[in-house]
């Protein structure tokens, strides 16, 4: 007796044996039991998931002679008492059940000769004449058109069962006249369970890890997994180890995948080249290797996110090993690795040299860990913007110019700025002439130089900030004049801008009434308070002519305001009414 392959020998003989399609088979059984048969069915799904097998089971259920009507439990072929109809259908020689390969009978003439011409002929012996059309999407457009009316209104004793792996290629005019059953890919755990049952029945000794590897190689197809099992048996005999499966099928085992992840974690690009060289020497398919690594990355992400072992049915590694590897990476790392390697795997289809692509792809994964995350970059940008506004380096950077006194002055200025914001609220609350201006400091603090001193900044930082503020106000000419200053120094509430004799024209530009007003506003924005401006020529004497009469009046008011703030009577009034000094009238 000739050898029969496992996929054919262990073809399901009853609905309960169809692995991974329990919902579909239960629906079909119920429709047969309750006599709710449809005249046309369309089975769609991936290869090797049970479409043709289920079609034959439906045909046997409709025509089984064990019962006087269709039954959901037709005869089992291994049973010696099986009826002739069930045996003939299972062996593909029944006169009333016609299996048609649409891939080789694509034309309208084939459909007319095989189906249409004999559609009105009653079944020779059985209850129903069943047409099983495999790969129906291969029919031509004219063949579909010829079949359309027949599928819509067939004779009472005719049932159509069509199977396809490409449902989208079947015209909607056909699918709308059929009951659609979508067969899903089978979980690796269920495939492994079925293979273990077959191995026990065939007296084959095989490790559980080897069973999982074969099930994973099936990629959701029971027939592919059974064919791979046949191949491994031919290679290793009746005692199969995990190493035998890896050699026979050319797949990457758990140890190879662990080497890849450890190389990425430890940043060892040389390991990537060694791994690929070893795979090439053993004749492994590099595209399958990339798919194995992608599946492994997916399992690591599942462990990292949920840790549910039920979601790891496609993994060749133990859960404990996956948890150890997942601890080496963050979720964002694993997602970036997956997308990068997916691009590498897609490029292998048209690659001139697959080895080079895989080597570069693995080294790229190892280099990706050096990249800063987007969150870190956003944080650094925010710190730099804050440094530009305040004139000091970011806090986490250890600058040699940062001193304790500078930190103290910074704290003082921050407190003053906060008080200024609070003062504006007080200004709205009071209607008296004494209302809310910038904060009033205590008498002992108003004379202390540290309370009004600007924190030390890096050379040119204050000038750069003033220039930036002027450019923001679209005053590039004033910004250029500020750039010509030889020295800019802030002492108390007065900003000294010193020019060399050659840059006197820049001083004259800034000293103009309108320009001086804009400059004071820019300086107030940068420093957080109103300040006076003093222009100096490098010969050592202040250029009083550069200060406008408006500036003189403003300085006088500022001095009078400071004197009023130190007056005990004024302080008592401010404290009682919660007000602040808005203006001082000069007499």
Image: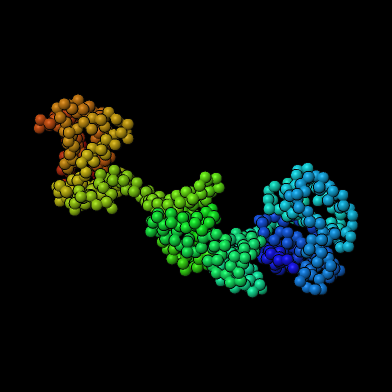
- The residue at the point 78 percent across, 45 percent down is 107
- Pinpoint residue 479: horizontal percent, then vertical percent: 26, 32
Residue 385 horizontal/vertical position (percent)? 32, 44
Kindly identify the residue that appears in the image at 66 percent across and 73 percent down.
Answer: 201
Q: Is residue 359 above or below residue 503?
A: below
Residue 310 occupies which quadrant of the picture? bottom right
Give the color scheme: rainbow, by chain, secondary structure or one colour: rainbow
Q: Camera-side residue: 501 or 132?
A: 132
The reply to whether residue 392 is visible in this rendering is yes
- Of all residues, the one furthest to the left in this rendering is 540
Q: Quadrant of the N terminus?
A: bottom right
Would you say 440 lies left or right of 85 here? left
Q: Tell me which residue sits at (25%, 38%) in the image.
A: 464
Q: How many marks?
A: 0
Residue 400 horizontal/vertical position (percent): 20, 50
Q: Quadrant of residue 242?
A: bottom right
- Nearer to me, 252 or 173: 252
365 shown above or below 90: above
Residue 315 pos. (x, y %): 53, 63
Judged left or right of residue 584, residue 122 is right
Q: Residue at x 50, y 66 (%)?
A: 317
Q: Is residue 180 above or below residue 527?
A: below
Residue 539: name its quadrant.
top left
Q: Quadrant of the C terminus?
A: top left
Q: Is residue 39 visible?
A: no
**570 sits to left or right of 3:** left
Left or right of 279? Residue 64 is right
Q: Residue furthest front?
A: 1
Which residue is nearer to you in this view: 377 or 523?
377
């Amino acid at each position: 007796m000739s050898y029969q392959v496992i996929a054919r020998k262990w073809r399901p003989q009853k609905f309960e044996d169809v692995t991974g399609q329990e919902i579909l088979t239960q629906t079909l059984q119920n429709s047969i039991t309750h006599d709710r048969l449809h005249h046309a069915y369309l089975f769609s799904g991936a290869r090797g998931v049970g479409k043709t097998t289920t079609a034959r089971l439906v045909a046997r259920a409709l025509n089984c002679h064990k019962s006087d009507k269709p039954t959901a439990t037709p005869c089992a072929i291994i049973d010696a008492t099986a009826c002739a109809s069930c045996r003939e259908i299972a062996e593909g020689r029944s006169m009333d059940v016609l299996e048609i390969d649409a891939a080789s009978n694509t034309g309208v003439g084939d459909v007319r000769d095989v189906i249409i011409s004999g559609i009105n002929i009653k079944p020779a012996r059985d209850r129903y004449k069943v047409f099983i059309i495999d790969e129906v999407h291969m029919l031509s457009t004219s063949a579909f058109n010829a079949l359309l009316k027949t599928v819509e209104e067939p004779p009472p004793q005719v049932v159509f069962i069509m199977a396809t792996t490409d449902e989208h290629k079947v015209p909607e005019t056909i699918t709308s006249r059929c009951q659609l059953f979508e067969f899903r890919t089978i979980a690796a755990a269920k495939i492994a369970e079925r293979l273990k049952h077959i191995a026990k029945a065939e007296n084959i000794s095989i490790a559980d890890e080897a069973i999982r590897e074969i099930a994973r190689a099936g990629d959701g197809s029971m027939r592919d997994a059974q064919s791979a099992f046949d191949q491994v048996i031919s290679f290793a005999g009746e005692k199969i180890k995990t190493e035998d499966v890896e050699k026979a099928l050319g797949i990457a085992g758990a140890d190879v995948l662990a080497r890849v992840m450890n190389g990425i974690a430890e940043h060892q690009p040389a390991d990537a080249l060694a791994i690929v060289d070893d795979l090439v020497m053993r004749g492994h398919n590099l595209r399958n290797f990339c798919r194995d690594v992608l599946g492994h990355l997916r399992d690591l992400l599942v462990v990292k996110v949920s840790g549910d072992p039920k979601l790891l049915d496609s993994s060749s590694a133990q859960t404990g090993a996956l948890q150890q590897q997942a601890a080496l990476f963050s979720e964002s790392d694993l997602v970036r690795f997956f997308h990068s390697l997916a691009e590498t795997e897609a490029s292998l289809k048209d690659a001139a040299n697959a080895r080079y692509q895989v080597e570069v792809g693995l080294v790229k994964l190892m280099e990706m860990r050096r990249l800063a995350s987007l969150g870190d970059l956003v944080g650094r940008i925010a710190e730099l913007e804050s440094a530009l506004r305040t004139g000091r380096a970011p806090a986490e950077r250890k600058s040699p110019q940062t001193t304790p006194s500078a930190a103290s002055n910074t704290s003082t200025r921050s407190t003053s700025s906060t008080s200024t914001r609070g003062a504006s609220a007080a200004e709205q609350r009071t209607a008296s002439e004494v209302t809310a201006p910038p904060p009033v400091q205590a008498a002992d603090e108003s004379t202390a130089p540290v309370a009004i001193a600007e924190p030390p900044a890096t050379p040119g930082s204050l000038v750069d900030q003033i220039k930036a503020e002027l450019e923001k106000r679209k005053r590039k000419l004033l910004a250029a004049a500020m750039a010509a200053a030889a020295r800019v120094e802030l002492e108390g509430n007065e900003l000294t801008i010193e020019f060399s004799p050659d840059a006197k024209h820049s001083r004259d530009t800034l000293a103009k009434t309108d320009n001086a007003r804009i400059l004071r506003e820019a300086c107030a924005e940068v420093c957080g308070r109103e300040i006076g401006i003093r222009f100096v020529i490098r010969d050592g004497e202040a250029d009083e002519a550069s200060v406008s009469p408006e500036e003189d009046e403003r300085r006088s008011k500022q001095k009078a305001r400071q004197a009023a703030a130190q007056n005990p009577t004024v302080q008592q009034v401010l404290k009682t009414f919660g007000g602040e000094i808005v203006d001082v009238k000069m007499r």
